């Protein structure tokens, strides 16, 4: 019989390369990680996704594990230890700003069960891919000698801005600025980028999160590289500059969303039950002319008060254009808002479709009838739009979204600004609404009505869409990079690199 180490080596020699993915439990992070796991599985690797029990159940309920041939692993999680309700396991369950820090601290306590899971695996996985926010994975990976890449949600353009801003003390300078509107140039960018208060790049930049940010930056520095959901042709200069600034390999493997094919794939994204069936929405879109419908949605986090909803609704009605508009259940808490929305639906019947709750966004954006997207510029939404050749009206709300707007409008030329300048997650009760109905009707008309500028935006979006598809096909840059990534982290290479073979 073989000695245990020989056994382990023999098992390792025949095993598939095994990637363990650790997403941040928020839709904008989970969705691309699930897509990435599926991509890895489709290319012959073994992919496991590690998350908290409630997120695991959501994914299993959505049938994600069965269709996708990936393993979903539950780790014990105790939000109650941090004063959070037991179901607070995903950013969409965070009720107010005071819960943000406890949520991250609770996530850090996943380290011991994560380590126990890894120690029980024979052979050990070839590579961990953990969200930038999950800095607690760094110590576990190094104690077990497992290579670790970090996955960073936004574009290379954004991440490069963040590194350059940090290197030049821009956060401090902007925080000290007397005027909120004062603009500051981000040094070292291949394209001109200006920021002001509330719009400086970087996550966890509020004073209470200082330690978390430092931990994340430290975990980034000891990682073996980064995986980014983008493609080289979209931002080649920024990819190169980011790689140089980081001093580590940057694996651009996207757009991940293009891996999804067919109804089941696109409908199961997000693991939530859609507010409308994909077949119903597709049937409705089938009746519309190509490029005629505007899709309006603000991601999974931003929440609008009724008075802002009213302006959007009247603006869409006034635009005269066919529309699909996603309204969250949480935005319809008041009976007044529900009654108002039903009346709007009656007035725009046939021309407008309101989705309550979760929309099958990829099915909408990939439909030929959809010719424009009013978006909050979350990176996933923006990239999904570009990947399907759909130009955008940009209405950023917070975090990386203002910089994504600059990328879409000023660098790529696929977007039109609605004109907001101040960050907002949930509007204060007494604050004026940032965008009025006239502004919405005007932006939608400019995006959808044709004319030279509109045609130019559409042409550019379609050109990037074609390049995105090429990147993901055999021989394309993202496709080949994924092959290289898997080869780099197969057991043989890893064992040789680590001197154990
Ligand atoms: N999404 C969806 N249906 C919805 C809302 C969002 O499928 O009703 C998906 C969307 O396609 C994207 C993700 O959720 O993949 C949202 O991520 P993004 O980065 O755009 O924004 P965030 O939600 O993080 O603000």
Image (cartoon, rainbow, N blue to C red):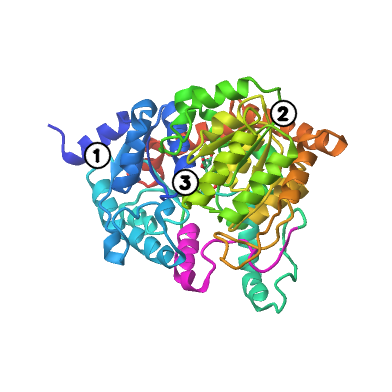
Tag 1 residue: 122
Residue at 48% across, 31% down: 276
Q: Nearer the viewer, residue 412 or 126?
A: 412
Tag 2 residue: 292
Q: Residues within 10 Å of mark 2 (few under 14, many from 20)?
A: some
Which mark's residue is nearer the viewer, 2 or 1?
2
Secondary structure at badge 3 equals helix
Residue 349 lies, in percent from the top left, at 62, 30
N-terminal label among 2 and 1: 1
Q: Residues within 10 Å of mark 3 (few under 14, many from 20)?
A: some
What's the mark number on residue 63? none
N-terminal label among 2 and 3: 2
Q: Is mark 1 within 8 Å of ligand 1?
A: no
Residue 347 lies, in percent from the top left, at 64, 35
Q: Residues within 10 Å of mark 1 (few under 14, many from 20)?
A: few
Q: Nearer the viewer, residue 485 or 432?
A: 432
Q: Is residue 212 magenta?
A: yes
Tag 3 residue: 329
Cβ–Cβ under 8 Å for marks 2 and 3: no
Cβ–Cβ under 8 Å for marks 2 and 1: no
Residue at 73% across, 41% down: 318
The magenta segment is 193-221
Q: Nearer the viewer, residue 117 or 196?
A: 196
């Amino acid at each position: 019989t073989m000695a245990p180490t020989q056994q382990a080596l023999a098992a390792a020699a025949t095993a598939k390369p095994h990637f363990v993915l650790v997403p941040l439990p928020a839709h904008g992070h989970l969705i691309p990680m699930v897509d990435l796991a599926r991509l890895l599985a489709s290319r012959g690797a073994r992919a496991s996704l590690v998350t908290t029990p409630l997120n695991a159940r959501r994914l299993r309920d959505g049938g994600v594990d069965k269709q996708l041939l990936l393993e979903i692993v539950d780790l014990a999680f105790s939000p109650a230890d941090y004063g959070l309700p037991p179901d607070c396991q995903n950013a969409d369950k965070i009720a107010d700003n005071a819960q943000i820090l406890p949520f991250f601290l609770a996530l850090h306590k996943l380290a011991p069960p994560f380590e126990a899971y890894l120690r029980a695996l024979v052979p050990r996985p070839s590579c961990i891919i953990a969200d930038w926010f999950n800095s607690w994975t760094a110590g576990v990976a190094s104690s077990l000698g497992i290579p670790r890449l970090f996955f960073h949600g936004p574009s290379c353009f954004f991440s490069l801005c963040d590194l350059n801003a940090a290197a030049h003390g821009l956060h401090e300078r902007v925080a000290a600025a007397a005027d909120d509107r004062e603009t500051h140039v981000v040094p070292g960018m291949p394209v001109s980028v200006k920021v002001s208060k509330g719009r400086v790049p970087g996550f966890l930049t509020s004073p209470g999160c200082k330690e978390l940010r430092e931990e994340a930056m430290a975990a980034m520095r000891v990682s073996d590289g980064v995986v980014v959901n983008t493609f080289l042709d979209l931002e080649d200069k920024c990819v190169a500059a980011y790689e140089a600034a980081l001093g580590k390999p940057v694996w651009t493997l996207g757009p991940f969303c293009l891996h999804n094919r067919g109804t089941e794939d696109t409908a199961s994204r997000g693991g939530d039950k859609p507010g409308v069936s994909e077949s119903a929405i597709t049937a409705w879109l089938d009746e519309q002319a190509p490029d005629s419908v505007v899709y309006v949605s603000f991601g999974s986090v931003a929440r609008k008060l009724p008075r802002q909803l009213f302006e959007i609704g009247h603006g869409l009605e006034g635009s005269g254009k066919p529309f699909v508009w996603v309204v969250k259940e949480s935005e319809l808490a008041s009976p007044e808002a529900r009654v108002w929305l039903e009346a709007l639906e009656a007035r725009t019947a046939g021309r407008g479709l309101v989705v309550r709750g979760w929309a099958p966004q990829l099915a909408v954006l990939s439909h030929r009838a959809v010719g424009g997207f009013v978006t909050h510029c979350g990176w996933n939404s923006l990239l999904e739009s570009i990947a399907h050749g759909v130009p955008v009206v940009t209405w950023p709300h917070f975090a990386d979204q203002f910089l994504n707007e600059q990328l879409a409008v000023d660098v790529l030329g696929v977007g039109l600004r609605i004109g907001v300048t101040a960050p907002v997650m949930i509007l204060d009760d007494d604050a004026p609404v940032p965008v009025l109905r006239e502004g919405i009707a005007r932006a939608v008309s400019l995006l959808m009505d044709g004319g030279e500028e509109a045609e130019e935006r559409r042409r550019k979006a379609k050109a990037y869409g074609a390049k995105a598809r090429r990147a993901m096909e055999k021989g394309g840059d993202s496709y080949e990079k994924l092959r290289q990534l898997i080869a780099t982290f197969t057991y043989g290479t890893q064992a040789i690199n680590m001197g154990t073979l």
